[in-house]
Amino acid sequence: MKFTNVIRFMIKVLGIELLYEKMLESEVREGPMPNHIAVIMDGNRRWANERKMPSWEGYRFGADAAEKFFLWSIEFGIKTLTFYALSQDNLIKRNSKEIESILSNMYEKLDKLEKSGLIEKHRVRIKTLGSKEMLPDWLREKFERLENDTKNNDGIVLNIAVAYSGRYEILNAVKEIAKEVKEGKLNVNDIDEKVFESKLYTGDLPYPEPDLIIRTSGEMRLSDFLLYQSSYSEMMFIDAYWPDMRKIDFLRILRTYKKRKRRFGS
């Protein structure tokens, strides 16, 4: 009897949640969507630790959350999605077991995406932001092949920031410009924002600057992520850990974004 009551309660709660999700979805579909969403997927380790699981297990569940978030973004017409998957500092300083898990999860999800037919169906373009030379050959080659195979696709752009550093990205752009000036290919007086932005990892994207940056787990910092591109991005900091991300959370984020007044310094 008690078990039956529990089941009834769960059905009631799930029914209310589903109804709320449908209401949110109807509300969110009205008006323009952000063109570019960037996500700092934080809290994977803490999520695992609270469940008495090895820390690297959190990244496996986090990879599942990223997969769902990507599908929701397609559903709602987001044109560019950027995941902050692994920073240069993470790659250098984190436990080797964690890094192995993160990179393996990344490979598995890319492989699954490649075999799913979604790339062809939705004309997905895949792009890597970061220092690919720091990655193991088996993952670097996977990224490079997918980038090459999808470079002419005109659907959603999926950016994966891996071995990434915003400070290094800016420094690298400065070095490239300095080299072109030294070689006589570029005049100093011709250097402007457009020239500088073309040297960034996002320089060839139709929407290089995120309209919205989301960070989960309650932390409120950028952590060296898209430092130049985020000048006028809307920021949203979510208390939930990344593996707990639900479609309701995704819809609430979009609803909050739509209520904000973007002024771009005006």
Image (cartoon, rainbow, N blue to C red):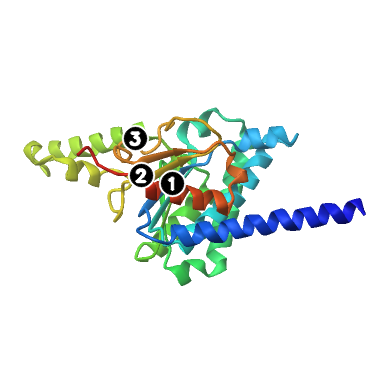
- Do callouts 1 and 2 mark residues in contact (Cβ within 8 Å)? yes
List the residue tagged with mark 3.
227
| Dot 1 amino acid type | Thr
Q: Quadrant of residue 133?
A: top left
The kind of secondary structure element at disc 1 is helix
Label annotation for residue 256: 1
Which quadrant holds the C terminus?
Answer: top left
Q: Residue at x 35, y 55 (%)?
A: 35
Q: Residue at x 35, y 31 (%)?
A: 167
Question: Does residue 67 appear in the picture of this structure?
Answer: no
Circle 1 Cα neighbour tier, 10 Å, few/some/many (<14 / 14–19 / ≥20):
few
Question: What percent of the width, then of the height, locates residue 41?
Answer: 52, 41
| Dot 2 amino acid type | Arg
Label annotation for residue 197: none
List the residue tagged with mark 2.
260
Circle 2 Cα neighbour tier, 10 Å, few/some/many (<14 / 14–19 / ≥20):
few
Closest to the observer, 211 or 139: 211
Mark 3 or mark 2, which is nearer the start of the sequence? Answer: 3
